[in-house]
Image: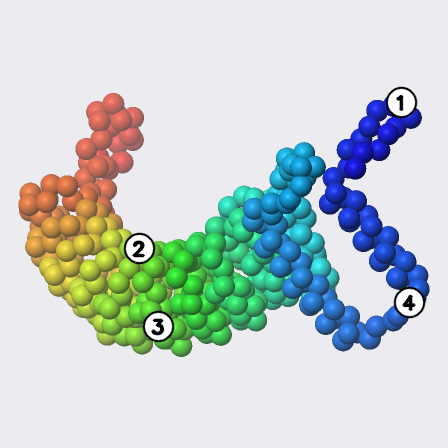
Amino acid sequence: MRLVGAAGGSTHIPRRVLGAVARSADLSADNCKMGITKRRPWERSAENEEREKEAAAAAGRFAGVPEAEEGSDVDSDSDLETEGTHGLGELVKETLYLRSCRVHSVVPASCFLRQGSDPELNLRHCGLGPQGAQALASSLNSNPYVKRLDLRDNGLCGAGTEALANALSKSSCICDVDLSENQLGAVGAQAICAALIANPTMQKVQLAGNGLEEQASQYLAELLLAHTGLKSLDLSYNQLNDQAGETLGPALAENTGLIELNISWNHLRGPGAIAFARGLEANIFLRVLDISYNGFGDPGASAVGKALRTNNVLEELNVSNNRISAVGARSLGLGLRVNQTLRSLVEIQVNREFDDLASSVKAVLPGLCIKTAAHRVEYKKELLPVFRSSLPASAPK
């Protein structure tokens, strides 16, 4: 349809716009006839939920390719409609999120509204809390753009994580999620592990600093056994103890897929450390392992050394600050002599005896990088003369 202006020019109006105006007029007339009906609180809540579902369905439709229409006059509008599809999908996504925020009585996160089509949604340190997580969860499935979701330090707790877990289990886009420092506990760990098991697209998960203890280790072990697509897992800065090590060790042995594991700053000691090391011995996929700051001690170091004799895939290992003496370091070094794949061994507190052993290992594996306290001392001794002259007389050379 075309309208003729006062100056004689004409303006083309797409049929979709005319249809929308007509429907709006009909709706207004109906409202005038029926009047306004007050609704009870629970009826409004049900209506809000229905609106969220309708908006989510609309967002899914608008995220796809626009439908082809018949008629020659439609062709002239196709370019404008295609350009508007992306913006309309964004509007539906934002509307759904804002409605969800009103339902849960939370302030919308401006970062989400500004996200647009960016593949990373960074909401760390936003103070979402459990209610904010529930509002966000209802909008995630209608967002086809997010690949990486960063929710670090938002106080989600168990309730917020359960709401997000339902959305993550259904997402076919998100493959990288950071839920560190959210006080998940055992309840949150159970929910998120179950969601990850149900979602084979997830490849990287960070759960650091969540107070995970022995009970949570059972759910983590199930995740390691069931999810073959998970490539990177961060469990650092938790409270996984000896019993957790005895649970995770056998699961690590059976895991088929994990390439990088960070379990530093936990409490793996004694029998737990030995059981975990035995899991490393049988694993044939892990490439990078960080077990620093756990207190493995000499028994744990000996078990790791034994694992290195058999393991032929591990490339990087961090065992720093594990209360390993020269005896444990020597057991670890004997495993290094046999191992042919390890390229980097990070920071062992040792004496000259291990340094000599490391030198002999380096002769066999010239590409191996061993970072030890002994090497740092040697570096101080080998200062260039120009720097030695500037040191005071009492300073060590």
- SS class, disc 3: helix
Number of the label disc, if any, that sits on residue 222: 3
Is 106 located above or below residue 113 in the figure?
A: below
Q: CA distance from mark 1 to mark 4?
A: 42 Å
Q: CA distance from mark 1 to mark 2?
A: 71 Å
- SS class, disc 2: strand
Q: Nearer the viewer, mark 3 or mark 1?
A: 1
Label 3, residues with CA under 10 Å away: few <14, some 14-19, many ≥20: some
Disc 1 marks which amino acid?
A: Ala
Whichever of labels 2 and 3 marks the residue nearer the N terminus, that label is 3
Q: Nearer the viewer, mark 1 or mark 4?
A: 1
Q: Nearer the viewer, mark 2 or mark 4?
A: 4
Q: CA distance from mark 3 to mark 4?
A: 57 Å
Q: CA distance from mark 2 to mark 3?
A: 17 Å
Disc 2 marks which amino acid?
A: Glu
Q: Could one spot residue 356 in this view of the protein? A: no
Whichever of labels 1 and 4 marks the residue nearer the N terminus, that label is 1
Q: Along the horizontal axis of the image, is 150 left or right of 331?
A: right
Disc 4 marks which amino acid?
A: Met
Whichever of labels 3 and 1 marks the residue nearer the N terminus, that label is 1
Residue 197 position in % (x across, y down) = 40, 67
* Residue pointed to by mark 1: 7
Q: Nearer the viewer, residue 69 or 157?
A: 69
* Residue pointed to by mark 4: 34
Label 1, residues with CA under 10 Å away: few <14, some 14-19, many ≥20: few
